[in-house]
Amino acid sequence: GLHRRVAGMPIFIPSWTHKDGVCYYAICLEGQGLGHAAWRRYSEFDALCKEVKEGIPGITAKTPPKDPLRKIFASKPVFVATRAHGLQVFLRRLLREVWQASCRGGG
């Protein structure tokens, strides 16, 4: 049913770009190209996480930790790809947890 479709909704972060020294990640849904992407920086994922946790008790999803060496490695493809994967995992888990909470009447 709808619960299964939403809980399993494929969210991808297939790309990123650097602008003015900041990395922006492309958030896409399955079947949509980059033309439909929402571009967000790490701090926006972090703010989303905090806001959702304040509003819905029991959410355990968390953004990947900030690496103390990120200033040095931030433009390195391996660093950015690793962070993009972590953010993708975070978004998928957050969506699943928020949906489950709404099904329980918790938000």
Image (tube, rainbow, N blue to C red):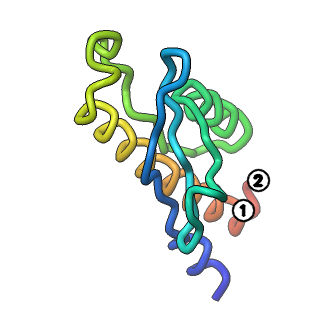
Q: Compare residues 64 and 20 and report the one nearer the observer.
A: 20
Residue 75, given in percent of the width and then of the height, sits at 33, 23
Which mark, residue 79?
A: none
Q: Compare residues 5 and 16 and report the one nearer the observer.
A: 16
Image quadrant containing the N terminus: bottom right
How dense is the environment of label 1, judged by Cα within 10 Å: few (below 14), some, or many (20 and up)?
few
Q: Amino acid at mark 1?
A: Ser
Disc 2 is placed on an element classified as loop
Q: CA distance from mark 1 to mark 2?
A: 5 Å
Residue 84, quarter of picture: top left
Which residue shows up at 57% across the image and 24% down it?
43
Residue 76, given in percent of the width and then of the height, sits at 26, 26
Residue 82, quarter of picture: top left
Tag 1–tag 2 contact (CB < 8 Å): yes
Q: Is residue 29 above or below residue 16?
A: below
Which residue shows up at 72% across the image and 62% down it?
102
The residue singled out by tag 1 in the image is 102
Q: Compare residues 26 and 69 and report the one nearer the observer.
A: 26
The residue singled out by tag 2 in the image is 107
49 sits to left or right of 84: right
Q: Amino acid at mark 2?
A: Gly
Q: Is residue 95 above or below residue 67?
A: below
